[in-house]
Amino acid sequence: TTVNCILKNMSKYELTRHFNKYDYILVDESSQLIQTIYKILEHIKNTTKCKIILIGDPNQCVGKDALEESWINTRFGYELCDSNLIELQKHDEIRYTKETDELLQEIKSYPDNASRKIRKLIYNRLKHTTSYETKTHIAYYHRTIDKIKEKGLECEKLEKIHSNQGKTIKGEYTIHDLNHLTKKLIYTAVSRCTDYRDRKLFVEEADKKRYE
């Protein structure tokens, strides 16, 4: 069940009464939460015995009101978890190939305002396409998704990049709207499957000059 469905439909009294019987609340993909939800979690923490555990990757997409930095990396996130911050390191059973992990680490090494350099990086690393041969497409803009729908293609998945956070895509897929992707959007899009060779970039012929 999504956090929005549970928390936003309950009054403060109901929140306190309901969550006081639990010891922990574990919230996954918390980097995408908006500030309103963090304030509700703050109320639960202050009025119940409940401990809050936030799980999320600050390198991925953020809440729509958080600009470039996730609320998980602010006072709200730290205080909700009593300033207990644990960074998980990669392990032997990590789902990424060595090449994919190296690409993701390289993306993370750039500052947030280096989107143009990161676009060129993945342009040089991923396969390009000007067609729609894959069955799965992820994009930044709704209009891009509508454009693909209008072509009447048989797609297994056609969604926004934000909607795919936390999911694993099996097989080849195409990333659209490269010219408008930020560092976090690129990281999220590239990290959806285990092998970066399964990813393709949809690049208009006129746009190739930007990266070559």
Image (cartoon, rainbow, N blue to C red):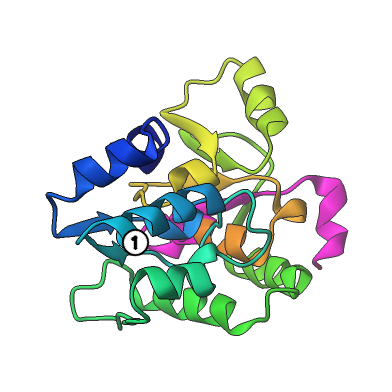
Q: How many marks?
A: 1
Quarter holding residue 87: bottom left
Question: Left or right: 6 with respect to 190?
Answer: left
Please tell me whether residue 136 is drawn above or below residue 35 in the rendered image. Answer: above
Residue 134 appears in the picture as rendered: no
Quarter holding residue 98: bottom left
Q: Residue at x 43, y 47 (%)?
A: 172
Q: Residue at x 68, y 74 (%)?
A: 112
| Near-viewer residue (126 or 63) | 63
Residue 131 appears in the picture as rendered: yes
Which percent across, then down, holds residue 45?
Answer: 32, 61
Q: Quadrant of the C terminus?
A: bottom right
Q: Does 123 appear in magenta? A: no
**Type of residue at label 1?**
Asn
Which percent across, then down, holds residue 63?
Answer: 56, 52
Question: Left or right: 166 with respect to 91?
Answer: right
Question: Left or right: 110 with respect to 22?
Answer: right
Q: Residue at x 28, y 63 (%)?
A: 52
Q: Residue at x 70, y 65 (%)?
A: 119
Q: Secondary structure at mark 1?
A: helix
Q: Does 190 appear in magenta? A: yes
Residue stretch rendered in magenta on the structure: 189-211
| Near-viewer residue (86 or 91) | 86
| Near-viewer residue (151 or 139) | 139
Q: Quadrant of the N terminus?
A: top left
- Label 1 belongs to which residue? 46
Please tell me whether residue 146 is drawn above or below residue 2 in the rendered image. Answer: above
Disc 1 packing (10 Å; few <14; some 14–19; many ≥20): few
Which percent across, then down, holds residue 163?
Answer: 48, 41
